[in-house]
Amino acid sequence: MLHAVIMAGGSGTRFWPESRTRRPKQLLTMFGQKSLLQEAVERLGGLVAVDRLWVATTERLAPAVAEQLPELRRDAILIEPCKRDTAPCIGLAALRLLRDDPDATMALLPADQRIAPVDAFQQTLRGAVELVEEDPTRLITFGIRPTYPAETFGYIERGEPIQLAPLETGATGGDSSGAEKSKGSGGPTAYRVQRFHEKPTASVAQQYLASGRFYWNSGIFVWKARTILDQIRQHQPEMYTHLDRIAQAADSPRFDQVLREEFSAIQGRSIDYAVMEKAQNVLVIEAPFTWDDVGNWRALERWIGADAHGNVLAAERTLLQDTTGCIVRSTDPNHLVVAVGLEDLLIVVTPDATLVADKRQEESLRKITQWLAERGWTEYL
């Protein structure tokens, strides 16, 4: 059966001051009434039963996750004792799924992305599951066709194509809006992965874009839970040893202690570096949907839009004069934000902190929490 594991342990430091250690970006409601985490769960509706939904997160965030997702069983919130990057997190989740379902197919989905339309996403996910069912040794990832030469994403270079088996129309229910394919038609195209590439320089990113053979790495994966554990054992034997010790203690009264000791001893690695760059049977599906990793405040412009002066207004009360290209965000509906004679600034107002910055200074925004910690101002973290 298909299980979905939503990874929700990130810190979202580029969204300070609204994002905080106990409420990072995946828990924020920046695009409406639902958080990014709640949107991620909603996208799976009708495709993955609620009793096969899991959320991997940290001990600090677990209470907020439970509050936002009351429909989840409490044991479906998988708590990492400490941050060790994605490979140990995924290995731990795979172990838990196998306890319930020895033949579990596992979809890994970051909590901090926006995807539309839902029907196209579900169609692609079903196609990935079909590929895995045809060959359980396959590791599937989704690639996003680049729209500009991004330097902040990893890339996937594709090889020869593989056609998916035909899919059924209407499997997700509701109006497909043209995203579904009728019975007898092919699903979305998958390719063998030629190579994974790290974040490139500007000139290399331009070459990737021009070639048409490269995708942004979405961080979305589909595979058998047993297969990914076998791959971790093959390529990261030391990591697997610690994970196996955790599995052996699953029904023991010492489980919590073993989990903390063994997980903390793991050297953190991303799943890309730990497994995907080394494995043989890796496929990439070109995603036919709009994808946004919501990496910084400029995502508001892509989803909310700008006014005639290029200003993005994510605040209830604003007064802007002779101001262009600014992003204004306020968490207080009664707080008036006034801007006069400004250009290309980011203004974020929260009850205890206000940020004013050049909206293009992404790296500096990422370092704000580091600067606050160095000054001992932990109340703002």
Image (cartoon, rainbow, N blue to C red):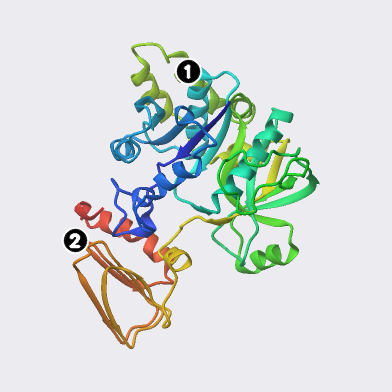
Residue 372, compared with residue 267, is above or below; it is below
Query: Looking at the image, which residue is at 55% across and 53% down?
Result: 117
Q: Residues within 10 Å of mark 1 (few under 14, many from 20)?
A: some
Instruction: Give the Cα separation between the discs numbered 2 and 1.
Output: 44 Å
Give the percent coordinates (x, y) of residue 147.
Answer: 62, 65
Of all residues, the one furthest to the front in this rendering is 174
For residue 281, what is the image quadrant? top right
Q: Viewer-proximal residue, 335 or 136? A: 335
| Three-letter amino acid code of the residue under disc 1 | Ala
| Residue 340, image quadrant | bottom left
Which one is earlier in the sequence, the residue at label 2 or at label 1? 1
Q: Position of residue 256 (x, y in %)?
A: 34, 20
| Observer-nearest of 64 and 265 | 64
Residue at (45% x, 20% y) in the render: 246
Q: In the depicted view, which residue is nearer to us: 27 or 182?
A: 182
Given the current orientation, which residue lies at the most extreme top position?
Answer: 252
The residue positioned 32% from the left and 61% from the top of the image is 368
| Res. 351 mark | 2
Which residue occupies the foreground of this view, 248 or 171? 171
Disc sitting over residue 247 in the figure: 1
Q: Secondary structure at mark 2?
A: loop
Q: Select label 2 or label 1 by which is in front.
A: 2
Mark 2, residues whose alpha carbon is within 10 Å: few (<14), some, or many (≥20)?
few
Circle 2: residue type: Pro
Tag of residue 42: none
Q: Residue 56 at x, y = what percent?
A: 43, 35
- Residue at 54% in and 19% down: 101
270 with respect to 381 (left or right): right
